[in-house]
Image (cartoon, grey):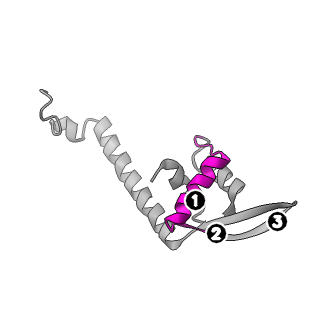
Amino acid sequence: MTEQAYLVLLALSGEALHGYAVIKTVRELSDGRTRLGAGTLYGNLDRLVAAGLVEAAGEEVVEGRLRRYYRATDTGRRAARAETLRLAELAERARRSLDGRGPEASGAGLAGTGA
């Protein structure tokens, strides 16, 4: 799962949101590091819907414009939890590696490098 898809899925794991609200929520979740454009957002939404992780949750007209709402499915929320766990485990392995406590500290993984 890409970081952008993960953040969109996280944004939709609570209440149903329309596109602009998803963009704002992703920006907040990432402390401003991820800024989705409309094309990127809707491309991710299309893929997440096709995968059964997100579903349409209704439409409304606001000031003459159609707002389409989306929400994570139960499968999508489970996928977001699994990805969160995977990223937490990766971050822990990275911390150990950077602190010299990872596999490379014992020489593992260096076979064939001459080290």
Q: Nearer the viewer, mark 3 or mark 1?
A: 1
- The secondary element bearing badge 3 is classed as strand
Kindly report the distance in space between the C-alpha atoms of the residues bearing marks 2 and 3.
15 Å
The N terminus lies in quadrant = bottom left
Residue 78, position in %: x, y? 46, 68
Q: Residue at x 65, y 45 (%)?
A: 37
Write down the region rendered in magenta: 33-56
Q: Is residue 55 above or below residue 39?
A: below
Earlier-in-chain disc, 1 versus 2 = 1
Residue 77, position in %: x, y? 50, 67
Amino acid at pointer 2: Ala
Which residue is denoted by mark 3 in the rendering? 61
Q: Nearer the viewer, residue 99 or 61?
A: 61
- The secondary element bearing badge 1 is classed as helix
Earlier-in-chain disc, 3 versus 1 = 1
Quadrant of residue 107 within the rendered picture: top left
In the rendering, which numbered label is found on residue 56? 2
In the rendering, which numbered label is found on residue 108? none
Crowding at dot 3, Cα within 10 Å, few <14 / some 14-19 / many 20+, comes out as: few
- The secondary element bearing badge 2 is classed as strand
Residue with the most extreme top position: 114
Q: Is residue 107 left or right of residue 70?
A: left
Quadrant of residue 68 within the rendered picture: bottom right
Q: Is residue 104 above or below residue 17?
A: above
Amino acid at pointer 3: Val
Q: Is residue 21 left or right of residue 92?
A: right
Q: Nearer the viewer, mark 1 or mark 2?
A: 1
Q: Is residue 94 left or right of residue 115?
A: right
Residue 24 appears anywhere in the view: yes
Kindly report the distance in space between the C-alpha atoms of the residues bearing marks 1 and 2.
10 Å
Amino acid at pointer 1: Asp
